[in-house]
Amino acid sequence: MNSTPTAAPDLRQIMRDHRGFLLGEGIVFLLLGALAIMLPLIASGVLALFIGWMSLVVGILLFIRGFGLPGAEDRGTCVLTGVLFVVLGLVVILWPWAALEGLTLCMAFFCILRGVMDVAGKPSRSSSTAGLQVISGIAGILLGVLLLLWYPEDAEWAPGLLFGIQLLFMGFGTLAIWNALDHPEAVGVPSDEA
């Protein structure tokens, strides 16, 4: 019997092998982000409908689990949670613009909470990104406060705009990773020629 452990796959090499996918993903994020920023009302409506449908599907799955897997967990709690998700999903699907007010409040509190966590260094910050994490945290707190100050006037456009901005940052981050794969020395990756 051979007891030598198999080597773990090299994540950096896997990413290098799939650079084209990273490039495509980054471009799609940038394009969708720019579109959402240019059309924030439409993006907000699409986002609300997506959340509604997602809640509906989750609710149905929880309802099925409550009756299909007896003993796995408390049946009553699972069914009740499933019903609540279904009702929430239907309300958001039927009245997406009204649901945006609640979504905007949730986004404001999330931005503030995430900002406080970033400023406090949670999750633990690396020494190379400590300054960026603090700046990001302060920006998150300010954004959350502005959403609360402008509420409810910002409820229709803010979710779409913020979603677009998030997609842009995801696109830039993905393209930065894609670019760094060409320059291993910039990210501390050992060169293949050595």
Image (cartoon, rainbow, N blue to C red):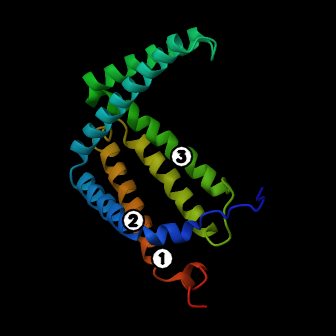
Instruction: Give the crowd class for mark 2: few <14, some 14-19, many >=20 residues within 10 Å.
Output: some
Q: Give yes or no for contact between labels 1 and 2 (Cβ–Cβ under 8 Å).
A: yes
Give the vertical position of 23 relative to 164 (above or below): below
Instruction: Give the crowd class for mark 1: few <14, some 14-19, many >=20 residues within 10 Å.
Output: some
Where is residue 39 drawn, in percent x and y?
21, 50
User: In the rendered image, which residue does mark 3 sit on?
Assistant: 112
Secondary structure of the residue carrying numbered label 1: loop
User: In the rendered image, which residue does mark 2 sit on?
Assistant: 22
Amino acid type, callout 1 = Leu
Does label 3 or label 1 sit earlier along the sequence?
3
Q: What is the distance, in whole Å, between disc 3 and disc 1 at their CAs?
A: 34 Å
Name the residue at the bottom extreme.
194
User: In the rendered image, which residue does mark 1 sit on?
Assistant: 181
- Of the pair 113 and 65, the residue shown nearer to us: 65
Secondary structure of the residue carrying numbered label 3: helix
Q: What is the distance, in whole Å, between disc 3 and disc 2 at their CAs?
A: 31 Å
Residue lying at 56% horizontally and 85% vertically, measured from the top left? 192
Residue lying at 50% horizontally and 47% vertically, measured from the top left? 111
Does label 1 or label 2 sit earlier along the sequence?
2
